[in-house]
Image (cartoon, rainbow, N blue to C red):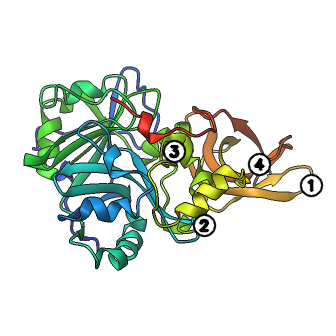
Protein backbone atom coordinates (compact mmCIF):
# COMPACT_ATOMS: atom_id res chain seq x y z
CA UNK A 1 0.00 0.00 0.00
CA UNK A 2 1.09 3.61 -0.51
CA UNK A 3 2.49 5.52 2.44
CA UNK A 4 0.17 8.43 3.33
CA UNK A 5 3.03 10.09 5.20
CA UNK A 6 5.48 10.16 2.28
CA UNK A 7 7.58 13.28 1.99
CA UNK A 8 7.86 15.52 -1.04
CA UNK A 9 11.05 17.13 -2.27
CA UNK A 10 9.56 20.55 -1.51
CA UNK A 11 9.76 19.78 2.21
CA UNK A 12 13.53 19.43 1.85
CA UNK A 13 14.14 22.89 0.42
CA UNK A 14 15.66 25.31 2.89
CA UNK A 15 13.81 28.36 4.18
CA UNK A 16 15.73 30.66 1.85
CA UNK A 17 14.71 28.63 -1.20
CA UNK A 18 11.07 29.69 -1.39
CA UNK A 19 9.76 29.13 -4.90
CA UNK A 20 7.42 31.54 -6.64
CA UNK A 21 4.24 29.65 -7.44
CA UNK A 22 1.28 29.79 -9.76
CA UNK A 23 -2.13 28.43 -8.84
CA UNK A 24 -3.08 28.11 -12.50
CA UNK A 25 -1.31 26.63 -15.50
CA UNK A 26 -0.65 29.96 -17.27
CA UNK A 27 3.15 29.91 -17.49
CA UNK A 28 5.27 31.13 -20.39
CA UNK A 29 7.38 28.02 -20.96
CA UNK A 30 9.52 29.75 -23.56
CA UNK A 31 10.99 32.01 -20.92
CA UNK A 32 10.26 30.26 -17.62
CA UNK A 33 10.78 26.77 -16.26
CA UNK A 34 7.90 25.14 -14.43
CA UNK A 35 8.47 22.73 -11.56
CA UNK A 36 5.62 20.30 -10.81
CA UNK A 37 5.43 17.91 -7.90
CA UNK A 38 4.04 14.78 -9.56
CA UNK A 39 2.46 13.21 -6.53
CA UNK A 40 -0.01 11.37 -8.78
CA UNK A 41 2.86 9.22 -10.11
CA UNK A 42 4.72 6.40 -8.40
CA UNK A 43 7.41 3.82 -9.12
CA UNK A 44 6.68 0.10 -8.94
CA UNK A 45 10.03 -1.64 -8.65
CA UNK A 46 10.73 -5.12 -10.02
CA UNK A 47 13.97 -6.50 -8.62
CA UNK A 48 15.68 -9.89 -8.67
CA UNK A 49 17.66 -12.34 -10.81
CA UNK A 50 14.54 -13.19 -12.85
CA UNK A 51 13.24 -9.62 -13.21
CA UNK A 52 14.17 -9.50 -16.89
CA UNK A 53 12.57 -12.85 -17.74
CA UNK A 54 9.51 -12.07 -15.61
CA UNK A 55 8.81 -8.71 -17.26
CA UNK A 56 9.44 -10.14 -20.72
CA UNK A 57 6.35 -12.30 -20.27
CA UNK A 58 4.13 -9.45 -19.04
CA UNK A 59 5.23 -6.23 -20.74
CA UNK A 60 4.35 -5.06 -24.25
CA UNK A 61 7.87 -3.64 -24.48
CA UNK A 62 10.86 -5.93 -24.61
CA UNK A 63 13.24 -5.56 -21.68
CA UNK A 64 15.96 -5.35 -24.32
CA UNK A 65 14.52 -1.95 -25.27
CA UNK A 66 15.19 -0.60 -21.76
CA UNK A 67 18.81 0.49 -21.87
CA UNK A 68 21.14 3.05 -20.32
CA UNK A 69 19.69 5.69 -22.64
CA UNK A 70 16.12 4.54 -23.49
CA UNK A 71 13.15 3.95 -21.17
CA UNK A 72 10.36 2.77 -23.47
CA UNK A 73 6.65 3.04 -22.73
CA UNK A 74 4.90 -0.23 -22.01
CA UNK A 75 1.50 -1.61 -21.11
CA UNK A 76 0.30 -4.57 -19.04
CA UNK A 77 -2.84 -6.39 -20.15
CA UNK A 78 -5.35 -8.98 -19.10
CA UNK A 79 -5.46 -12.22 -21.13
CA UNK A 80 -8.27 -10.56 -23.11
CA UNK A 81 -5.98 -7.71 -24.12
CA UNK A 82 -7.53 -5.03 -21.93
CA UNK A 83 -5.00 -2.60 -20.49
CA UNK A 84 -4.56 -2.83 -16.72
CA UNK A 85 -1.98 -0.05 -16.62
CA UNK A 86 0.51 1.67 -18.88
CA UNK A 87 3.93 2.66 -17.63
CA UNK A 88 7.44 3.66 -18.58
CA UNK A 89 10.02 0.89 -18.27
CA UNK A 90 13.28 2.13 -16.75
CA UNK A 91 16.29 -0.12 -16.21
CA UNK A 92 17.37 1.35 -12.88
CA UNK A 93 20.22 -1.08 -12.14
CA UNK A 94 21.32 -4.61 -13.01
CA UNK A 95 18.44 -6.95 -12.16
CA UNK A 96 16.20 -3.97 -11.29
CA UNK A 97 13.49 -2.17 -13.27
CA UNK A 98 11.34 0.81 -12.37
CA UNK A 99 7.80 1.07 -13.72
CA UNK A 100 6.73 4.73 -13.69
CA UNK A 101 2.94 4.92 -13.70
CA UNK A 102 -0.17 6.64 -12.36
CA UNK A 103 -0.42 6.20 -8.59
CA UNK A 104 -4.12 5.31 -8.37
CA UNK A 105 -3.64 2.24 -10.55
CA UNK A 106 -0.34 1.05 -9.04
CA UNK A 107 -1.85 -1.23 -6.41
CA UNK A 108 -3.97 -2.99 -9.04
CA UNK A 109 -0.93 -3.59 -11.25
CA UNK A 110 1.06 -4.73 -8.23
CA UNK A 111 -1.58 -7.32 -7.38
CA UNK A 112 -1.86 -8.47 -10.99
CA UNK A 113 1.88 -8.94 -11.44
CA UNK A 114 2.26 -10.60 -8.03
CA UNK A 115 0.23 -13.55 -9.31
CA UNK A 116 2.96 -14.27 -11.87
CA UNK A 117 5.99 -13.07 -9.87
CA UNK A 118 5.44 -15.93 -7.42
CA UNK A 119 6.99 -18.25 -10.02
CA UNK A 120 10.12 -16.13 -10.48
CA UNK A 121 12.96 -14.77 -8.40
CA UNK A 122 11.53 -11.27 -8.62
CA UNK A 123 10.21 -8.97 -5.92
CA UNK A 124 7.69 -6.16 -6.41
CA UNK A 125 7.86 -2.99 -4.29
CA UNK A 126 5.97 0.28 -4.46
CA UNK A 127 8.76 2.83 -3.95
CA UNK A 128 7.04 5.51 -1.90
CA UNK A 129 10.48 6.58 -0.68
CA UNK A 130 11.09 8.07 -4.13
CA UNK A 131 9.77 11.49 -5.13
CA UNK A 132 8.85 12.43 -8.70
CA UNK A 133 9.25 15.93 -10.11
CA UNK A 134 8.46 17.37 -13.52
CA UNK A 135 10.42 20.17 -15.18
CA UNK A 136 8.89 21.85 -18.23
CA UNK A 137 10.10 24.71 -20.37
CA UNK A 138 12.54 25.66 -23.08
CA UNK A 139 15.33 25.90 -20.49
CA UNK A 140 14.32 22.95 -18.31
CA UNK A 141 17.57 21.14 -18.97
CA UNK A 142 19.57 24.05 -17.53
CA UNK A 143 18.30 23.20 -14.05
CA UNK A 144 20.07 19.84 -14.07
CA UNK A 145 23.02 20.46 -16.38
CA UNK A 146 25.58 20.83 -13.58
CA UNK A 147 24.66 17.57 -11.83
CA UNK A 148 23.73 15.66 -15.01
CA UNK A 149 25.45 17.20 -18.03
CA UNK A 150 24.39 14.39 -20.41
CA UNK A 151 20.62 14.77 -20.25
CA UNK A 152 18.32 12.82 -22.61
CA UNK A 153 17.67 14.70 -25.83
CA UNK A 154 14.82 12.69 -27.35
CA UNK A 155 11.42 11.37 -26.25
CA UNK A 156 11.66 8.40 -23.86
CA UNK A 157 15.38 9.01 -23.41
CA UNK A 158 16.74 8.37 -19.90
CA UNK A 159 19.81 8.82 -17.74
CA UNK A 160 20.20 6.69 -14.62
CA UNK A 161 22.56 6.91 -11.67
CA UNK A 162 22.11 3.64 -9.73
CA UNK A 163 24.43 4.72 -6.92
CA UNK A 164 22.05 7.41 -5.67
CA UNK A 165 18.75 6.00 -7.00
CA UNK A 166 18.33 8.77 -9.58
CA UNK A 167 16.70 8.68 -13.00
CA UNK A 168 15.88 11.52 -15.40
CA UNK A 169 13.69 10.81 -18.42
CA UNK A 170 12.24 12.93 -21.22
CA UNK A 171 8.53 12.83 -22.03
CA UNK A 172 6.75 13.77 -25.25
CA UNK A 173 6.05 17.43 -26.02
CA UNK A 174 7.37 20.13 -28.32
CA UNK A 175 8.87 21.89 -25.32
CA UNK A 176 11.35 20.12 -23.06
CA UNK A 177 9.70 17.94 -20.40
CA UNK A 178 11.90 16.11 -17.93
CA UNK A 179 10.80 13.82 -15.12
CA UNK A 180 13.19 13.39 -12.20
CA UNK A 181 12.91 10.34 -9.94
CA UNK A 182 14.99 10.24 -6.77
CA UNK A 183 14.75 10.40 -2.97
CA UNK A 184 13.13 13.71 -1.93
CA UNK A 185 16.32 15.14 -0.44
CA UNK A 186 18.24 14.37 -3.64
CA UNK A 187 15.72 16.17 -5.84
CA UNK A 188 15.79 19.17 -3.48
CA UNK A 189 19.57 19.18 -3.80
CA UNK A 190 19.43 19.02 -7.58
CA UNK A 191 17.02 21.91 -7.95
CA UNK A 192 18.31 23.89 -4.97
CA UNK A 193 21.00 25.77 -6.86
CA UNK A 194 18.53 26.84 -9.56
CA UNK A 195 15.47 27.44 -7.39
CA UNK A 196 15.39 31.14 -8.28
CA UNK A 197 14.89 30.19 -11.94
CA UNK A 198 11.87 27.98 -11.26
CA UNK A 199 8.16 28.56 -10.89
CA UNK A 200 6.20 26.03 -8.86
CA UNK A 201 3.24 25.01 -11.01
CA UNK A 202 0.11 22.95 -10.29
CA UNK A 203 -0.42 19.40 -11.53
CA UNK A 204 -2.96 20.77 -14.04
CA UNK A 205 -0.05 22.20 -16.05
CA UNK A 206 1.47 18.74 -16.49
CA UNK A 207 -1.96 17.36 -17.39
CA UNK A 208 -2.37 20.04 -20.03
CA UNK A 209 1.04 19.19 -21.49
CA UNK A 210 0.12 15.49 -21.55
CA UNK A 211 -3.07 16.42 -23.43
CA UNK A 212 -1.10 18.50 -25.94
CA UNK A 213 1.23 15.52 -26.39
CA UNK A 214 -1.74 13.15 -26.88
CA UNK A 215 -0.52 11.09 -23.94
CA UNK A 216 -2.88 9.30 -21.56
CA UNK A 217 -1.71 7.61 -18.36
CA UNK A 218 -4.45 5.23 -17.30
CA UNK A 219 -5.85 5.69 -13.82
CA UNK A 220 -8.05 3.42 -11.71
CA UNK A 221 -11.22 4.62 -13.47
CA UNK A 222 -9.92 3.38 -16.82
CA UNK A 223 -8.46 0.06 -15.70
CA UNK A 224 -9.34 -2.84 -18.05
CA UNK A 225 -11.61 -0.69 -20.25
CA UNK A 226 -9.50 -0.31 -23.38
CA UNK A 227 -7.26 -2.16 -25.76
CA UNK A 228 -3.87 -0.40 -25.81
CA UNK A 229 -4.44 0.86 -29.37
CA UNK A 230 -7.58 2.66 -28.22
CA UNK A 231 -5.39 5.17 -26.40
CA UNK A 232 -2.90 5.27 -29.30
CA UNK A 233 -0.22 3.41 -27.39
CA UNK A 234 1.31 1.80 -30.48
CA UNK A 235 1.69 5.29 -32.05
CA UNK A 236 3.79 6.31 -29.03
CA UNK A 237 6.14 3.30 -29.33
CA UNK A 238 4.36 1.51 -26.50
CA UNK A 239 3.84 -1.86 -28.18
CA UNK A 240 6.44 -4.16 -29.72
CA UNK A 241 4.93 -6.40 -32.37
CA UNK A 242 8.26 -8.22 -32.72
CA UNK A 243 9.16 -9.30 -29.18
CA UNK A 244 6.98 -12.39 -28.86
CA UNK A 245 4.48 -13.48 -26.26
CA UNK A 246 3.23 -11.55 -23.24
CA UNK A 247 -0.08 -11.68 -21.42
CA UNK A 248 -2.76 -10.36 -23.80
CA UNK A 249 -0.40 -10.30 -26.79
CA UNK A 250 -2.55 -12.42 -29.10
CA UNK A 251 -5.58 -10.13 -28.75
CA UNK A 252 -3.50 -6.96 -29.12
CA UNK A 253 -1.73 -8.29 -32.22
CA UNK A 254 -4.95 -9.57 -33.80
CA UNK A 255 -6.63 -6.19 -33.36
CA UNK A 256 -3.65 -4.54 -35.04
CA UNK A 257 -3.25 -6.85 -38.01
CA UNK A 258 -6.96 -7.25 -38.71
CA UNK A 259 -7.75 -3.56 -38.32
CA UNK A 260 -10.24 -4.19 -35.53
CA UNK A 261 -9.57 -1.03 -33.52
CA UNK A 262 -12.80 0.99 -33.78
CA UNK A 263 -12.05 3.53 -31.05
CA UNK A 264 -9.21 6.00 -30.73
CA UNK A 265 -7.85 8.63 -28.40
CA UNK A 266 -8.64 12.07 -29.79
CA UNK A 267 -7.81 15.61 -28.71
CA UNK A 268 -10.56 18.22 -28.45
CA UNK A 269 -11.25 21.72 -27.18
CA UNK A 270 -14.48 23.06 -25.68
CA UNK A 271 -15.41 26.46 -24.21
CA UNK A 272 -15.21 26.59 -20.43
CA UNK A 273 -13.03 27.33 -17.46
CA UNK A 274 -13.27 24.14 -15.42
CA UNK A 275 -11.93 20.67 -16.11
CA UNK A 276 -14.50 18.09 -17.17
CA UNK A 277 -15.19 14.99 -15.14
CA UNK A 278 -13.73 11.80 -16.62
CA UNK A 279 -16.53 9.86 -18.25
CA UNK A 280 -18.31 12.99 -19.56
CA UNK A 281 -19.87 12.06 -22.89
CA UNK A 282 -18.76 13.44 -26.25
CA UNK A 283 -21.91 13.68 -28.34
CA UNK A 284 -22.81 13.65 -32.00
CA UNK A 285 -24.46 17.07 -31.94
CA UNK A 286 -26.82 16.30 -34.79
CA UNK A 287 -28.09 12.88 -33.70
CA UNK A 288 -27.66 13.40 -29.95
CA UNK A 289 -25.78 10.11 -29.77
CA UNK A 290 -22.74 9.41 -27.61
CA UNK A 291 -19.52 8.88 -29.56
CA UNK A 292 -17.16 8.50 -26.63
CA UNK A 293 -16.03 9.81 -23.26
CA UNK A 294 -13.58 12.27 -21.78
CA UNK A 295 -10.57 10.63 -20.11
CA UNK A 296 -8.44 13.67 -19.25
CA UNK A 297 -9.01 17.43 -19.35
CA UNK A 298 -7.36 20.65 -18.24
CA UNK A 299 -8.30 24.34 -18.58
CA UNK A 300 -6.22 26.64 -20.76
CA UNK A 301 -5.63 30.36 -20.37
CA UNK A 302 -8.12 31.34 -23.10
CA UNK A 303 -11.44 30.29 -21.53
CA UNK A 304 -11.27 26.85 -23.09
CA UNK A 305 -10.74 23.35 -21.80
CA UNK A 306 -8.53 20.98 -23.75
CA UNK A 307 -9.17 17.28 -23.38
CA UNK A 308 -8.47 13.77 -24.49
CA UNK A 309 -11.42 11.50 -25.25
CA UNK A 310 -11.65 7.91 -26.43
CA UNK A 311 -14.13 7.97 -29.29
CA UNK A 312 -15.62 5.78 -31.99
CA UNK A 313 -13.89 6.35 -35.31
CA UNK A 314 -16.00 7.97 -38.04
CA UNK A 315 -14.92 8.47 -41.64
CA UNK A 316 -16.78 11.78 -41.64
CA UNK A 317 -16.82 13.07 -38.10
CA UNK A 318 -20.12 14.87 -37.35
CA UNK A 319 -20.38 18.10 -35.34
CA UNK A 320 -19.48 17.37 -31.73
CA UNK A 321 -20.70 18.72 -28.42
CA UNK A 322 -19.88 18.24 -24.74
CA UNK A 323 -22.37 19.34 -22.09
CA UNK A 324 -24.19 21.31 -24.78
CA UNK A 325 -21.08 23.23 -25.86
CA UNK A 326 -19.59 22.91 -29.34
CA UNK A 327 -16.43 20.80 -29.24
CA UNK A 328 -13.64 21.12 -31.80
CA UNK A 329 -11.33 18.32 -32.86
CA UNK A 330 -7.66 19.26 -32.57
CA UNK A 331 -4.65 17.78 -34.31
CA UNK A 332 -2.63 15.16 -32.50
CA UNK A 333 1.16 15.67 -32.59
CA UNK A 334 1.78 12.21 -34.05
CA UNK A 335 0.45 10.00 -36.81
CA UNK A 336 -2.03 7.25 -35.93
CA UNK A 337 0.28 4.53 -37.12
CA UNK A 338 2.58 1.98 -35.57
CA UNK A 339 5.87 3.27 -34.16
CA UNK A 340 8.07 0.34 -33.23
CA UNK A 341 10.01 0.74 -29.95
CA UNK A 342 12.93 -0.91 -31.73
CA UNK A 343 13.38 2.39 -33.59
CA UNK A 344 13.80 4.51 -30.45
CA UNK A 345 17.20 6.15 -30.00
CA UNK A 346 18.78 8.91 -27.95
Residue 215: numbered disc = 3
Tell which tag, 4 or 1, sits nearer the viewer. Answer: 4
Task: Tell me the SS state at disc 2.
Answer: loop
Between the residue at mark 2 and the residue at mark 3, the CA separation in whole angstroms equals 17 Å
Residue 4 location (% of width, % of height): 26, 71
Task: Tell me the SS state at disc 1.
Answer: loop
Between the residue at mark 1 and the residue at mark 3, the CA separation in whole angstroms equals 29 Å
> Vertically, is 113 above or below 57?
below
> Vertically, is 1 above or below 334?
below
Residue in the image at 39% along x and 64% along y = 57
Residue in the image at 58% along x and 70% along y = 80
Between the residue at mark 1 and the residue at mark 2, the CA separation in whole angstroms equals 25 Å
Between the residue at mark 2 and the residue at mark 4, the CA separation in whole angstroms equals 17 Å
Of labels 4 and 1, earlier in sequence is 1
Residue in the image at 43% along x and 25% along y = 28
Would you name the residue on which mark 2 appears?
A: 225
Q: Assess whether mark 2 and mark 1 are in contact (beta carbons under 8 angstroms).
A: no
Residue 24 shows in this picture = no
Of labels 1 and 3, earlier in sequence is 3
Q: Assess whether mark 4 and mark 2 are in contact (beta carbons under 8 angstroms).
A: no
> Vertically, is 289 above or below 269?
below
Q: Residue furthest left?
A: 163
Question: For the C terminus, which image quadrant?
Answer: top left
In the displayed structure image, the side of residue 220 where residue 335 appears, left or right: right
Would you name the residue on which mark 1 appears?
A: 287
Question: For the N terminus, which image quadrant?
Answer: bottom left
Amino acid sequence: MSDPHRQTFLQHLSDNQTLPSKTDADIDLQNHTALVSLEDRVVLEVRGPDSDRFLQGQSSASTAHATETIAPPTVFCTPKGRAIANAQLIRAAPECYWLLLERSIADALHQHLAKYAAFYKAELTLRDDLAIAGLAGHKAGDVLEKALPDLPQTTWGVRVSPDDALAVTRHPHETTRLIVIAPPARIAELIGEKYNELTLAPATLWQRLDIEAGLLWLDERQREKWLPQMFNWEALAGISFKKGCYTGQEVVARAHYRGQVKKRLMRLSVPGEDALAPGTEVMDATREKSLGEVVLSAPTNNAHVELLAIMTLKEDMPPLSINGETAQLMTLPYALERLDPETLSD
